[in-house]
Every structure is written in C-alpha cells, then in structure tokens.
Amino acid sequence: MTDFILHNGSGRLCLRSCGRQDRQLNTYDWLADIPGNENESEYVEVQFKNTRKGYFRNSNHLELAKGDIVAVEATPGHDIGVVTLTGRLVPLQMKKTGVRNEADIRRVYRKAKTNDMEKYAEAKAREHPTMIRARQIALSLGLDMKIGDVEYQGDGNKAIFYYIAEGRVDFRQLIKVLAEAFRVRIDMKQIGARQEAGRIGGIGPCGRELCCATWMTSFVSVSTGSARYQDITPNPQKLAGQCAKLKCCLNYEVDVYVEAQKRLPSKEVTLRTKDAEWFYFKADILTGQVTYSSDKSIPANLVTIPALRAFEVINMNRKGVTPDTLAETDNEQKQVSADLLEQESVTRFDRKRKGKGGGNGAGKKKKKKNKGGGDAQAPETKQDGIAQASVEAKEENKEASAEKSAELSRSKNRRNKSKKDIRPMDKNNGKREEKESGNAQS
C-alpha cells in the first residue's frame, strides 16, 4: 500500500490506496482536512475482500485513519480488514446502507499486529486450492452451480464460498462435504453474473475498464426496453456484455431518449397529402427528424421532415386540409446547415486574394508615422491626404501616358519622313545608271 500524504496542515487526507477494489467502494472523505474530524464519531468503515465492507465501533478509542489494517470482531474469532472511512461521514454512510440497529454493530479489537498478519497470510494462501477442490466436489455432487471465489476469515476459522447459479440450489450436502474436507466453518454466498464480472475485471467494447469493476456498487436490472427506446438494433451479440447479460450502460441515456421521444409524433399516425398517404418509417430521436414512407410494408419514396412539420401536417389533416407535398415548400423558412469545418480547410491559405488597388499597381498608400515626433494628424486630414495623393497619382499616370503616346507618334513620323527621303534618291540613281550604261554601249 502506498501513502499519499498531503501537507496542508491536517497531516493526511483520504488519498490512500486500499487495493484494487477501493476504487469501487471508496467514499471520498471531503471533511478529512478539518481538524478533529476523526474523533467526531466512534464508528469506522472497514473493507474486506470482494467488495465486502462493514461498520464497526471503535470502543477502545484507537487513533485510526484511512488505510490502517485492523482486527475486528467476527463470528467466530476475528477478521482482518482495512479502514476506509472515519469521522462524521460514517454515520451518514450507515444510514445510506440501511444499518439501523446499532446494538448489532461489532467492535474493533486493535490494530493488526505481526502475529495477526502472519495468520492472515496463511489463510489467504489456502484460498485458491480450496476453490479448485470445492469446484470438484460440486461437480461430483451434480450441482448446477459455479464456485467463483473463496474468502477465508483473518484467523482462518471460517471460509465464505461465492457461487453463481441460475436457479435455486440445494447445497446442504455440499456444506457437509466441504466442512469435513477443510475443517472450517462454511458460509455460502450467491452473487450475480455482473458481480462476478466486476470481481474478475476486464476491458469493455468501448475501450475502457468495466464499469462494474471500477465504480458500480448497485446493479439495476436492464431490460430490452432500454434498447427499444434508443432505437438500437436488437442484436444479442452487441447488446450483451462480458457477463452475458445486457450491458449496464444501456440505462445511462435511456431517460434522455424517453424525454426526446415526447417531442416526436406517434408512430401510428398516418399523414395525408394530395398525392399519397405517408406512414411512419423511422426517426432520428436526438435531431428531431422523422422519415415517412409511401408504402406501409416496404420503404418507398422516403421523405425526411422535421417533427414540427409533421405536427403541422397532422393539424392540417384534422381540419380537413391536405397539403400539396409532405416536405416544406420553398416559401417556408428552412434551416441551412453550416459548415463548421470550413475555416479548418488545409487549402484555405492557397486562395488568391484580389487587390484593392488599380491595374497599374498604384493603390491607396498608407502614410507612415513620423518617428521623429511632431503633431499627429487627425483622422479626417489623413483621409483627405490619402485621397489627394491618389488623385495626384492618377493625374501623373495620365500625363506620363500622354507623353509616351506623343513620343511614339513623333518617332513614327520621323521614320515615315526618312523613308520618303530615301526612295526618290534611289529612283534618280537608277536613271543615271541606265543613261551611263546606254552611252557606253553607243
């Protein structure tokens, strides 16, 4: 056992681990840090093996705290257990568990000594061989039962046999044989399949440890109506837990589904429209959506509408009015589902953003603040300056484009003029060359 001491002035708090089953039967002592809480009541809560615990009177006024191993009164002899709760919360727990007659409450003898722990260790070492031998004896007697565990008393004078049976078992002959075989006092205790699963432990289909092995202490009967209210497919392989019974978690949310079904129309009501009659097919209870079919036996022309729309059609049919269609019309306001993951798109930063400036790249320029100090401009003057700067920039662009076009026209005129000057010279030169060649021939 590991002690978790909290240095908050009180010395210790109820954070000690008393074994695997302590999570299941643990009572959080939220008054443990109050000075003098341990002396408020003479009763203490003591836990034993297999989720067995009892309440005892500290008549010797021992200084007991959670996690102390004590020797308590038993029938016969004494038993060894672990203190799990002290102080003023113990009477409240006794009232909760139904302990009324305080005269029947046994007392705490002492804190466990070395001799007590040695006897306790010897008794615990005999538990597993005793269980195997008891199973063989029950099988030889032809009893329809399964012995799941054996718990010896701290002094070894008594043994509790935990068994599972579907019906009533006459184990009188079994008790005689077990008493002769093990020379101890025999006590038979029947447990259910859920308690057996909680004792063994395991991992459920949800991936977590079984509820019956961690926190559940009282097991409420689970019926198939819990699955029917939640519209769960009646598949025995999925509805059954490791104990081969219906899962305890079927009862967790059944109240929510029962309350939600009150806001849905009855399955027996038929909706009438101008084109057909509509029969109830299925419903999404939590979202309030109802699906109707035009055929009563098979799914045909399925239409899903909200429950409010279904009640509207029912009221219209009662008044003798039949709507055109079962679904809502375009004029009626419809709920548009929002894409909650739109902003989480991986490519949302790859979209091209259009610039707010002009085509030449001359947009609105922000004025930089004067770092050297000076009077700060008012917001209106800043906006006027920006507008004036943009107008001046546009005028400068117009002047630059006009000058550029003028230069282009000038250069074009020069080229045309040069071509006109060159062509006549070429013609005169050709005539001169022809005259010279003719004179030479003559």
Image: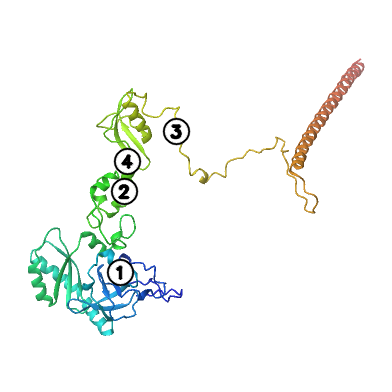
Hey, which quadrant is residue 297 in on the image?
top left
Q: Which residue is mark 1?
A: 91
- Determine whether, in the image, residue 98 is placed left or right of residue 384: left
Circle 4 is placed at which residue position?
262
Q: Earlier in the sequence, mark 3 or mark 2?
A: 2
Q: Position of residue 120 (x, y in %)?
A: 24, 79
Q: Earlier in the sequence, mark 4 or mark 1?
A: 1
Q: Earlier in the sequence, mark 4 or mark 2?
A: 2
Is 409 placed left or right of 193 in the picture? right
Front residue of 172/293: it is: 172
What amino acid is at disc 3?
Answer: Lys
Q: Earlier in the sequence, mark 2 or mark 1?
A: 1
For label 1, the crowd category at 10 Å Cα-Cα, with few meaning under 14, some 14 to 19 and many 20 or more, is some
Q: Earlier in the sequence, mark 4 or mark 3?
A: 4
Residue 334 — which label?
Answer: 3
Give the number of the mark in front: 4 or 3. Answer: 4
Kind of element beneath mark 4: loop
Give the answer, above or below, for where 60 lies relative to 142. Answer: below
Element type at mark 2:
helix
What whole-number distance in Å separates the C-alpha atoms at marks 4 and 1? 42 Å
* Label 1: which secondary element: helix
Which disc number belongs to residue 255?
2
Q: How is the image coloured?
A: rainbow
- Mark 2 is on which residue type? Asp
Q: CA distance from mark 3 to mark 2?
A: 30 Å
Q: Secondary structure at mark 3?
A: loop
**Which of pointers 2 and 1 indicates the residue nearer the eye?**
1
Quadrant of the frame with the N terminus: bottom left
Q: Position of residue 95 (x, y in %)?
A: 28, 65
